[in-house]
């Protein structure tokens, strides 16, 4: 399992420029969805993190799933948080986030609580 960035989508010029020397940290213009998404990735402070935004709408679930697949392996678990109201920060009205701790496995509910596997296969 590993965190990785889509190097082909990395922003390499301008104020948000980075290079492969920055590792998994940087800004990216992703060819995801009908008109693309902007992402900022980091892997410091004990967390892997990708913020995902669009200029005038929130990313869809399908777009978020595609972004997760660009940055993590298929068997990695990543999550979105709803923080307590006292910790809530909103710097961009159309930004969502993926998170994964680097030093712990995320707990997950048992599959039987999520839904029947046959239904997931039929719709996936």
Image (cartoon, grey):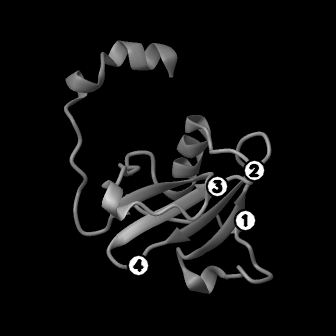
Q: Nearer the viewer, mark 3 or mark 4?
A: 3
Q: Nearer the viewer, mark 3 or mark 1?
A: 3
Task: Mark 3: give few (<14), some (14-19) or many (20+) Cα within 10 Å.
Answer: many
Precedes in sequence: disc 4 or disc 2: 2
Question: From mark 3 to mark 1, how far is it between C-alphas?
Answer: 18 Å
Q: Quadrant of residue 53?
A: bottom right
Look at 39% across and 13% down and name the residue there. Answer: 119
Q: Nearer the viewer, residue 87 or 10?
A: 87
Examine the rendered structure and indicate whether residue 55 appears above or below residue 87. above
Look at 63% across and 51% down and name the residue there. Answer: 94
* Residue hosting label 4: 44
Q: Position of residue 83 (x, y in %)?
A: 34, 55
**What mark, if any, has residue 33 been given in the picture?**
none
* Residue hosting label 2: 36
Precedes in sequence: disc 3 or disc 4: 4
Look at 54% across and 68% down and name the residue there. Answer: 41
**What mark, if any, has residue 8 been given in the picture?**
1
* Quadrant placement of the N terminus: bottom left
Task: For the residues labelled 4 and 1, say whether their Cβ atoms are less than 8 Å apart.
Answer: no
Q: Nearer the viewer, residue 105 or 64?
A: 64
Residue sitting at the far bottom: 21
Precedes in sequence: disc 4 or disc 1: 1
* Residue hosting label 3: 53
Precedes in sequence: disc 3 or disc 1: 1
Q: Position of residue 6 (x, y in %)?
A: 63, 63
* Secondary element at image label 3: strand
Q: Position of residue 62 (x, y in %)?
A: 59, 36
Q: Quadrant of residue 35?
A: top right
Task: Mark 2: give few (<14), some (14-19) or many (20+) Cα within 10 Å.
Answer: some
* Secondary element at image label 4: loop
Q: Is residue 101 left or right of residue 109?
A: right
Precedes in sequence: disc 2 or disc 1: 1
């Amino acid at each position: 399992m590993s965190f990785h960035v889509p190097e082909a989508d990395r922003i390499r010029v301008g104020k948000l420029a980075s290079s492969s020397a920055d590792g998994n940290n940087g800004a990216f213009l992703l060819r995801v969805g009908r008109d693309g998404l902007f992402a900022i990735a980091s892997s410091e402070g004990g967390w892997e993190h990708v913020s995902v935004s669009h200029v005038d709408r929130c990313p869809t679930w399908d777009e978020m799933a595609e972004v997760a697949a660009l940055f993590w392996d298929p068997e990695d678990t990543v999550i979105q948080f709803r923080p307590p109201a006292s910790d809530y920060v909103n710097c961009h009205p159309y930004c969502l986030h993926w998170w994964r701790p680097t030093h712990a496995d995320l707990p997950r509910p048992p599959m039987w609580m999520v839904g029947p596997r046959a239904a997931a296969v039929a719709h996936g």
